[in-house]
Image: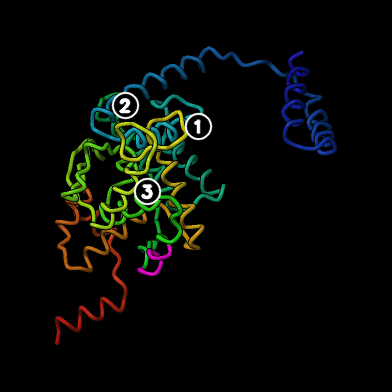
Amino acid sequence: MENEKLLNDIEIALSMAVDKETREKVMHIIISNLRNYEITKMETGVAVRDEVLNEDILKKYVACMAIDGKSKRTIKQYVWTLQKFEKVVGKTYTAVTTDDIRYFLGCLKMNGSKNSYISGQRACISAFYMWLEDEEIIEKSPCRKVKKIKVEKEIRLPFSAVEIDKLRSGCKRKIDRAIVELLLSSGVRCEELCNLKLMDVDLAKRIVNVKDGKGGKDRVTYMSDVAAEHIGKYLASRKVVGPYLFMPVRSKYDHYSIRGIEGIVSRAGDRAEVEDVHPHRFRRTFATDLYKRGMDIASISKLMGHANIEVTKQYIYIADEQLHGEYRRFTA
């Protein structure tokens, strides 16, 4: 009886994944190999308890991350990774071994994921198990023995002056140009830009007050005269009323989502024929441009909202010819 139900379930699943001819061949192979076996349905009581335990642990972890000031987006990414990890290993979080983690990361590698992505997944799992250890829910993190993934350093270029000019020409609406100019001149994160309210921006003084930024911290940064001019033009022409600086015309939401802003700059890039256009590249351009103009890294770090100056250094790109010029200037 259980054999028949299993075969029926498999056939239904195959019908949604492969064509009829392939399904019939696969079913023939399965039936031929199962004829000498008796299938017994597994009791699921333990699995249900495990699922509830994992859910309870995850809820506590989310609460702690929120208290520590992690952004909603970061928390969502952690939860997504840990839920995916749970499905692959099929255990309670507290029963996971080092080999389980290695298996999960190995599956990602076999599926073609880049080392940079796998490294991020490992970091997420490691942080979670260090929390479990600190909370004395487990004795020792099973991730301690999992070696860090070697990641080749990628050269992430800022926009060139030519690309910036092209991007400006690719802005067809006033709001598009205002967003591009603010990203270029203020260094705000995409999520921070989404959450900016009218009261947070002083166009006359060119001040941008970032509230509840990454890590739950407030900071002050600034905008260029050009950005202030285009934001003013956008605000004077917009027909929607609300507290946020940038608001979609037709949407059930009162301000843009991260995906919405990403879409705006990406489409501007497509129109301008500039590749790899996304909000974070504007932030990299902001840091590199200020450094080229002579601003010290500590000040740039403060404007960007970095707690660690070493993080800021990763945003700054110095071309070989510039490095050579600096060398000659100091050795002449």
For this rendering, which residue is in front, 305 or 45? 305
| Residue type beneath disc 1 | Val
**Is label 2 in a helix, a strand or a loop?**
loop
Image: magenta residue range: 161-166
Q: Number of numbered discs present?
A: 3
At horizontal 40% and vertical 57% (from top left) the residue drawn is 151
Question: Where in the figure is residue 275, as x and y percent of width and height?
Answer: 48, 61
**Is label 3 in a helix, a strand or a loop?**
loop
For this rendering, which residue is in front, 218 or 231? 231
The way the protein has been coloured in the rendering is rainbow
Above or below for 181 versus 30: below
Q: Looking at the rendered structure, which numbered label has been put on residue 138?
A: 2
At horizontal 20% and vertical 78% (from top left) the residue drawn is 326
Q: Quadrant of residue 309?
A: bottom left
Above or below for 159 versus 258: below
- Outermost residue to the bottom: 332
**What residue does disc 3 label?**
147
Can residue 143 be seen here?
Answer: no
Question: Where in the figure is residue 210, as x and y percent of width and height?
Answer: 22, 41
**Can residue 162 be found in the magenta stretch?**
yes
Which is more N-terminal, label 1 or label 2? 1
For this rendering, which residue is in front, 20 or 320? 320
Labels 3 and 1 touching (C-beta < 8 A): no
Which is more N-terminal, label 2 or label 3? 2
For the N terminus, the quadrant is top right
**What residue does disc 1 label?**
89
